[in-house]
Amino acid sequence: MSELITVTIDDRAVEVEKGTGLVETAAAAGIEIPVFCYEPRLGPPVGACRMCLVEIEGLPKLQAGCTLTAQEGMVVRTAATSERAADGQQGTLEFILVNHPLDCPVCDKGGECPLQDLTFRYGPGSTRMSFPKMTFDKPIPVSPLIALDRERCILCYRCTRFSSDVAEDGQLIAQNRGAHTEIATFGEDPYRAPFSGNVIELCPVGALTSTQYRFQARPWEIQDVPTVCGLCPAGCNVRATTREGQVKRVQSRNHPEIDAGWICDKGRFTFPHLGASDRLVEPLGRGELGLEPIGWDDALDRAEDLLRGAGGNVVTALSGSETTEIAYGLAVLMRRGLGAHSAVLHESTSAALDAFRAPLATIGEAEIVVVVGDEAVVDRAPVVELWLKQARRNGAEVVTIGAAGSTPTPPGSAADALQGLVGARSAVGKRLRDSERAVLIWSGPGGGGGARLAEAAHALGFEGKPGCAAFHLPATPNARGVAEAWAAAADEDEVELEGIGLLVVSGDEAASDPGVRALAEKADRVLAITMFPSLATGWADLVLPGTASLEREGTSMNLEGRVQRLRRAVTPPVPDELAWLAKLASRFDAALSPHAAVVFEELSGRIYDGLELSTLGERAPLPAPAPYVAPAPAPAPETAAPQGDARAGHFVGTLRLLRYRPLFSGYHVERVPELQFQRPEREVGLSAADADRRGIGSGDLVSLRSNGTSVELRARIDRKLVEGVARVAEEHAADLHLDVEVVRV
């Protein structure tokens, strides 16, 4: 048990644990110590701004309060009771404001600015400075997403500390010295990193602002809606800022167990796709001249005809990004109304992992973490990458096993790697078994990831250890919620399909999936639900407009197994999916409410043990771990295609194509001009050995060929990549097949 000590602050005695920061100790006594540079999430304090000056009994000089910790008998006086501390804080603010511009009326931070607030409360009432202030060129583009006004900067170093100590990208620096110190990137390079936008929120003075939000709104004109990011399975908590019915920005909303207040640039900056010029705002029906706009009544009539005409031979392809309620609505229509049971679902997290359920924050406190899979964690669930970096900083051993891992393995061998960890001779497995704070993570497709992960965690003895956990990173935001909602609507046994009379495609992710498009070629008719019709124009018979996560009410389940509530930030320009699904279901005598809260109540009784929507709150709780139930056994492994024999100096055989979905890809990113610089280069990753055998150097133009298809990309030598693999972003892989020939052009 931690030692409790007593500290006196402004004549108030407070009892705290020894070593508690003085800022937190004062807060426990109901006293504020004002700060600029101090931010606990950035690591140890640096005392750069001196705003936190306090008087400590027994010390001759004022001290930076943020750098001190509570000690037994310490007597502290803040500016509220100490004239010396008040003079010190006034002097600090006066110095900060010497060259700070008086542009509060036009500054984006005005009205929600800590410098503005603290100047009013602690600063001098007038200025003694009559000389001209320093000025700089403005704004300076740190990147297409971030603008820098140097004259506002107070050199608190929050932004550079985030870059170096949290995101660990090292791209934002303080250059020069003394009065000439400036925040900058290296040379003319933009700040190109997955989490760069967090420095905008960290900046306490409006020196770093969003190019998207700049001059768009003032604090008294906006509303902030608490919701959940719907772009990856982590389910980071966010708040959407709206003005006049439009989303103007997205900011983090600290949930310490999930995201610690950080969000990736995809979650932060892709909201403009809601107002894209090519967004579908009315249904499209196929006529003599192709797809043409039709009214909603006509669209529902056509949808009914398509559903009845399919004779029950209906396949529903779900994106995994639907709310649980929308997925349930589709299931009620298809399974109860039509008796059509077949669905294409993305691989979801296995229920067997509920025995090892824990907050994502568990990763940051782990002693050893093993990541298994062929896809980078940052591409699947970006905030998990930040937890891994925190774990490393805390001294944890992080082992990555995969095609580009610290322990390279052939693609698709993740399940075998897990079996190897469980084996008696595995040194890493022994450390996992002996540790009280060990974490397993699966990041990649195939192999029944969640189930295999649960088996490994069970074999390693993770049950009953609160510091141990296992996380499966699915490819879609709500894969498990969608799968459970689909299963919950079943009232009858499955029936065998006789062909595909109708393919129902739910969401743009499904519409852009090559596998779904292949199904569309086999289907007699196709009904697509999308936001952007270009994805389905060539093969859909009816296209109904879809909505985005920021336009929806409902719930989703993140990769922890935590049910969270989505709140509608803005009204969509089209009817909500549940509204027209309810109308359509009524035509087939299937009862479905158009209201998400009512649907959740029905769902909750079936799959969430009666969980009430009101208990989710703004920070949804994580259910306790469940008893372990062994998952179904793994299917027989597929036989790998034979490779050519290796002989140095010339082409010796094909390479296995390893597709991956980069974080900055998809229809959200494609429609945001400011994010284009973050998109993946047209390149192929090759191991040094494979490149050497083919006479390929980094940057060379190479051709990837398979089955009559070819793509030209730039080569990038990846010294972590296992031999025999060509790693290509999904959007650049086109129609290449599994095995490709790689030759220099």
Image: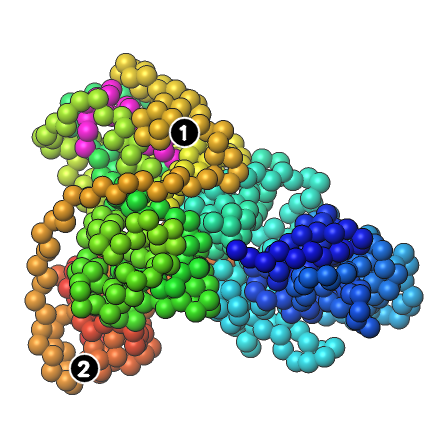
Amino acid at the residue labelled 1 = Leu
- Helix, strand or loop for the magenta stretch, by majority: helix
Q: Where is residue 131 in the image (x, y as percent from the top left)?
A: 89, 71
Query: What residue appears at the point 15 percent right and 25 percent down from the top-left corner?
Result: 493
Q: Give the range drawn in magenta.
A: 323-342
For disc 1, the marked residue is 611
Of callouts 1 and 2, the N-terminal one: 1
Amino acid at the residue labelled 2 = Arg
Above or below residue 262? Residue 703 is below
Q: Position of residue 456 (x, y in %)?
A: 23, 54
Q: Position of residue 476 (x, y in %)?
A: 33, 46
Mark 2 surroundings within 10 Å by alpha-carbon count, few (fewer than 14), some (14 through 19), many (20 or more): some
The answer to whether residue 452 is visible is: yes
The answer to whether residue 205 is visible is: no
Above or below residue 100? Residue 60 is below
Residue 472 tag number: none
Q: Position of residue 196 (x, y in %)?
A: 52, 61
Residue sitting nearer the eye, 210 or 518: 210
Residue sitting nearer the eye, 312 or 320: 320
Residue 693 tag number: 2
Query: What residue appears at the point 23 percent right and 25 percent down from the top-left corner?
Result: 490
